[in-house]
Amino acid sequence: MSLKSDMFSTETQCLTDRMYVYLWEDTTDIGVCKFGERWVFAGKDPLKDCNTRIRESLNVQKWKYDEGHIRTIGIWDVTDLAKKVGRYYKGARMDDYIREYLGHRKGTHTEAHNLSGDEMYVKVNKVLTKFGQPLPPLKLSTMQYKVAEEIITKFNNDETIIIAELCARFGKTLWSGVVAKEMDVDLVIVASYVTTAFTSFQGDITSFSQFSSYEHVDTRDTDYQQQINKALKSGKKVFAHLSLSGSTKRQERIDFLFSKRNSKMLIVDEGDFGAHQPKQAKPLVKGIDKVDYTIIMTGTNADRAVTFWPINSTHDSMISVTYPELLIQKRKVKNA
């Protein structure tokens, strides 16, 4: 089975002058992020140009960027919106126009916001969507595309549990979201012991047009059942975030999610960190026959991740991508 064509392409340079906004944070200053604007001239690479601007804004602290302390979280092309509101020109302060709807500003004349970068990322996407700003389509890397196609073929050949040992910088979140979309399941259960992963997962998935019909529900919300039922009833698909850390209501949440008659996929994120422990894994394993597809994702230790999972060589398998393999593939694409 091939993926849809809109899931794959390569980066291009700007053909005309474009207006961009960007979001970044200093990893040594947790809880604060910065949101700014960049006018990118035709012929420039917008990603490189925005990152150049971020580095320049650090002045005498450029060393923070050079040493990896600066994290670029999001870059958006807001050209159409800028034209719509009369701010399509260099220095138009399009970031300030959008900022009025974001809140959490640190002071009155600053790009800084008192919010984590991941939380702000979700807010920016929601605000731009309300403005009618179209979200960009997701473009998978060559390696992501190849591995997604492989796992979809396995699922279509009646395999039910896939162990995905995927290295750092592979892009596991978006990759797994694409697989869930391609399998056309109604309910995607994202289980993780690391609860901060949920904000990151939501931020990544809500950034692209292919996932505009999905709702995200945190099962720690008191009304999570109503949220899920309402979304599914309205024809939307749902990413339900299930915390595997200590909670007296964890089993209740698992029972509710697994009891839904809708098609389901279970994604265990960071399967070798916390999620591999018996109290976390066994309740999931117990109800696994009620789930259509399962992906156990890990970056380094697949053996530990599947300690309590009933892996069957006939119906289950493993996919692995090492960091050297990822680098080799990137170089092949670059030199093609």
Image (cartoon, rainbow, N blue to C red):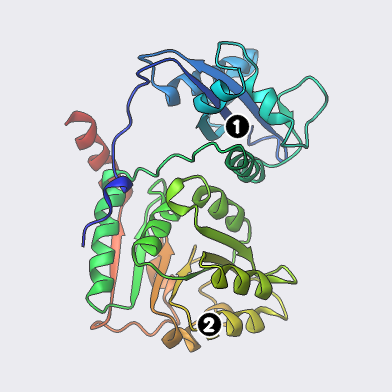
Residue situated in front as seen by the camera: 295 or 137: 137
Residue 119: x and y in percent read 66, 46
Depicted 96 relative to depicted 255: above or below: above
Residue for point 62% across, 64% down: 217
Check disc 1 and report the residue beneath it.
Answer: 24
Residue for point 62% across, 16% down: 57
Q: Residues within 10 Å of mark 2 (few under 14, many from 20)?
A: some
Given the image, on which type of amino acid does mark 2 rest?
Answer: Lys
The first of marks 2 and 1 along the sequence is 1
Given the image, on which type of amino acid does mark 1 rest?
Answer: Trp
Report the residue that reaches farthest toward the left.
Answer: 336
Residue situated in front as seen by the camera: 336 or 76: 76
Determine the secondary structure under disc 1: strand
Check disc 2 and report the residue beneath it.
Answer: 260
Residue 275: x and y in percent read 53, 71
Residue 55: x and y in percent read 55, 19
Residue situated in front as seen by the camera: 327 or 136: 136
Residue for point 79% across, 19% down: 109
31 left or right, relative to 282: right
Q: Residues within 10 Å of mark 1 (few under 14, many from 20)?
A: many
Query: Residue 88 bears which disc, if any?
Result: none
Residue for point 73% across, 81% down: 248
236 left or right, relative to 115: left
